[in-house]
Image (cartoon, rainbow, N blue to C red):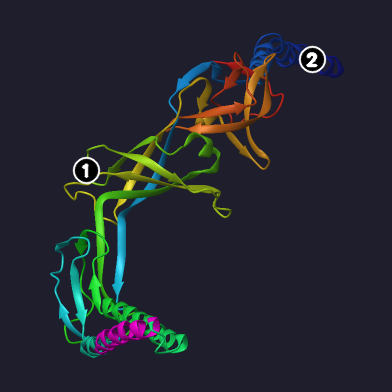
Amino acid sequence: MRTVLVVGVIIIALVLGKIFLFAKPDKGKDGAGSKSSGKSSGSSAIPVSVLVVSKETINNQIFASGTIIPNEEVDLKAEATGRLIKLDIQEGANVTKGQLIGKINDRELKAQLQKVIYNQELAKKIEVRQKKLLNVEAINLEEYDVTTTNIQILDAEREVLETQLARTEIRAPFSGKIGLKNISEGAYLVPGTSVVKIVQSNPIKIDFTVPEKYSPNIRPGSSIGFSLDGDGSDYWAKVIAVDPKVDEALRTLKVRAVAQNPGGRFVPGMFVKVEVSLSANENAIMIPTEAIVPVLKGKKVYVVKNGKAQETMVITGLRTDKKIQIVDGLQLGDSLITSGIIALKPNASVRVN
């Protein structure tokens, strides 16, 4: 009897185990298990945003930093030795070309010049008399030649002294504005002593540099725009010269432009923002800057082909605040991936949002 009860309990336990234990996994496999499998299959594709590559028209512009320099500038220095007996300048005042600025003591040179002048007058009188005597053969030709040579020597000595006297005068080489003087009247000068600077700031010049690849687009005679910090106005200048050599270290080209400055608004040494407009490009390919992936060998982007992400190396050109030009590597109509790029790998499955 006891054996029968044990067997009965075992049978009941097996039946209950089949109902409650083995039936649930089967249900999960048919229901929840199938649902989970379907979800895993759908989540393997990376969601991305796509932009169809197309043409755009862009106005090529170069922005550069420039410096205003004077049209003419010179540091006036003494050419002679002596005491400065006159300094006729007012700091910050305008001067005209040829105006006397300073005078060095020249009394000794004037005395030497006067002596030469007296000797010249005497030599000329002797020459006149000897010429008459030569005509009647009262003197020989050699004596007459000595006198004429002496006159020529005196002429040369006079020219030397007059040149030395001119060096005692310090004059403005061009019209401009006087700077701050470096010496005072009464100082003893030697050749090379700085007296004062003269600056001509109308017109003014603007020096700036551009990358070497834009050198074919900038020519003398073309116009540029520029602006000053804290000034909302736009100004214009004309390119007058382009450096014939590219800076080998920076790979830039130096450009010089000129602008009128009648009111003195532009002061030499000022910083300016330069804008150079180039010819418009009507067939440019512009893409968002966030689509670019920097790599060791350059730059790349991802495009969608047959539902997969394919990487493509590109060459870039002009850049704006939000977009960058693609010079090579993309074709019109390509599906460019613009989001989800961090999670992408070559040939990864993608799903376009």
Q: How many marks?
A: 2
Element at badge 1? loop
Q: Secondary structure at mark 2?
A: helix
Type of amino acid under label 1: Asp
Residue at x 25%, y 64% (from the top left corner): 198
Q: Earlier in the sequence, mark 2 or mark 1?
A: 2
Up/down of 161 relative to 30, above or below: below
Q: Is residue 116 part of the magenta span, yes or no? A: yes
Residue 349 in sight: yes
The residue nearer to you, when weighing 284 against 3, is: 284
Residue in the image at 22% along x and 43% along y: 231
Query: Which residue in the rendered view is the most extreme toward the front?
Result: 136
Residue 136 coordinates in the image, percent (x, y): 38, 84
Query: Which quadrant of the view contains residue 310?
Result: top right
Out of 17 and 133, give the one closest to the viewer: 133
Q: Is residue 37 left or right of residue 151?
A: right
Residue 111 badge: none
Give the position of the N terminus as an image quadrant: top right
Q: Which quadrant: the C terminus?
A: top right
Amino acid marked by disc 2: Leu
Asked whether the beta carbons under mark 2 and mark 1 sit within 8 Å of each other, the answer is no
Residue at left offset 30%, top offset 61%: 73
* Residue bearing mark 1: 231
Q: Main secondary structure of the magenta part?
A: helix
* Residue 214 placement, left or right of 192: right
Residue with the mark numbered 2: 14
